Image (cartoon, rainbow, N blue to C red):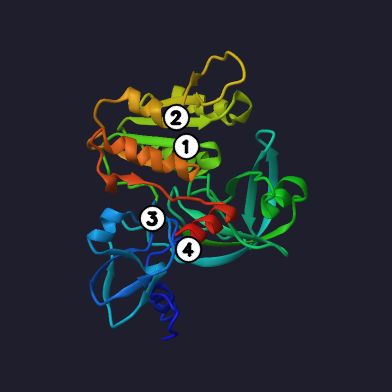
Amino acid sequence: MDPDQTILDAALRANVDYPCGCQSGNCGACKSRLYTGKVELTPYSTFALDQSERDQGLVLACRSIPLSDCEINPLEQDEVAAHPNRTMSCKIASIKKATHDIRLIGIDVADGERFSFSAGQYASLTFTGLPPRDFSMANNPDQSRLEFHVRHVAGGTVSGHILNELKVGDTVSVRGPYGMSYLRERHRGPIIAVAGSTGLAPIKSIVGTALQAGTKQSIYLYFGVRDERDLYLVDHLEKMATNFENLTFMPVLSEPSNVIKYRTGLVTDAVFSDFDDLDGCKAYIAGPPVMVEHAVEKFQLLGIRREDCHADAFYTEAEKAEINQSE
């Protein structure tokens, strides 16, 4: 074993089916309990592993370099999403302008085969000549056409290419699925779904899949953006709320430029003010890491268990570099 090889790298090279996501210490998908042995943890995000978890003997397999023989096991999930990890050749089928800086991308698998995933998961997309980037599927898993929501990031090479140069018919490689923030279909309590900006993609998939399955529990969908011009798919979501009595849809604007009809403030604060008790709920949270972290902290004050807050933290390449430098 290479002296700088992580436990996750060693497991994957040995064809061990070890749960993982970003493989860079940001998502927490490979969180594990270290029973015996010692490891050196390389820099990681405290969202993926906080100090209280470290004190309980938990580590991230993707950041753990063994210093001795180790006995380790990934944390058990309440429901396991078992899908083969595959790389599929695909083509761009549609490009739709959602807002001034967001595009909805439709992708078809080249041979017509369906991409197997659970609602809420994401994939790694690689465009010709560009580095891979992670994006969440917004479509329901039973739909053959994949849907992704892409927002332009200032200075972003890949997002800039998608918004300014991508054309229908272009090829793209799709690898996955990844992520632990997928719909727990056996859960029968209320669902709190919170989306910030293009975090709407996995939330749309989760809520749409739950409703399609005929779920009867209450679903509360909060969609937070800065200003009215940043909202998208509102008509679609309002129509869903009309068609399904158990769905409540609430757009929230944090920095409105004009007096508008929508609620204002932070989307996480809107949830916090609407509920007195979240015990027994499942929360699915997707959006900027700071929003996700704030939501988890606030919701736990209302009684929800940490293990019932599901989120895959997405960091820009600049944010990842900053984390690695600061830790």
Query: Where residue 191 sits in the image (x, y, percent)?
Result: 33, 36
User: In terms of sequence position, does the residue under pointer 2 or pointer 4 come before the other?
Assistant: 4
User: In terms of sequence position, does the residue under pointer 3 or pointer 4 come before the other?
Assistant: 4
Mark 3 surroundings: few (<14), some (14-19) or many (≥20) residues within 10 A: many
User: In terms of sequence position, does the residue under pointer 2 or pointer 3 come before the other?
Assistant: 3
Q: Which residue position is annotated with label 2?
A: 267
Mark 1 surroundings: few (<14), some (14-19) or many (≥20) residues within 10 A: many
Mark 2 surroundings: few (<14), some (14-19) or many (≥20) residues within 10 A: many
Q: What residue type is labelled 2?
A: Val
Q: Which one is nearer the viewer's eye here, 38 or 28?
A: 38
Q: Which residue position is annotated with label 3?
A: 48
Q: Which mark is residue 195?
A: 1
Please state, as top left, top right, bottom left or bottom right, where the C terminus lies in the image: bottom left
Q: Which one is nearer the viewer's eye here, 324 or 281?
A: 324
Query: Where residue 127 sits in the image (x, y, percent)?
Result: 68, 60
Q: Give the Cα separation between the discs numbered 3 and 4.
A: 10 Å
Q: What residue type is labelled 3?
A: Ala
User: In terms of sequence position, does the residue under pointer 2 or pointer 1 come before the other?
Assistant: 1
- Tell me which residue sits at (48%, 50%) in the image: 141
Q: Residue 24 carries which label?
A: 4
Circles 2, 1 touching at the beta carbon (< 8 Å): yes
Q: Which one is nearer the viewer's eye here, 172 or 43?
A: 43
Task: Label 4: state its secondary structure.
Answer: loop
Circles 3, 4 touching at the beta carbon (< 8 Å): no
**Camera sees residue 256:** yes
Q: Give the Cα separation between the discs numbered 2 and 4.
A: 28 Å
Task: Label 1: state its secondary structure.
Answer: strand
- Tell me which residue sits at (28%, 48%) in the image: 307
Mark 4 surroundings: few (<14), some (14-19) or many (≥20) residues within 10 A: some
**Viewer-nearest of labels 4 and 1?**
4
Q: Give the Cα separation between the discs numbered 3 and 1.
A: 19 Å
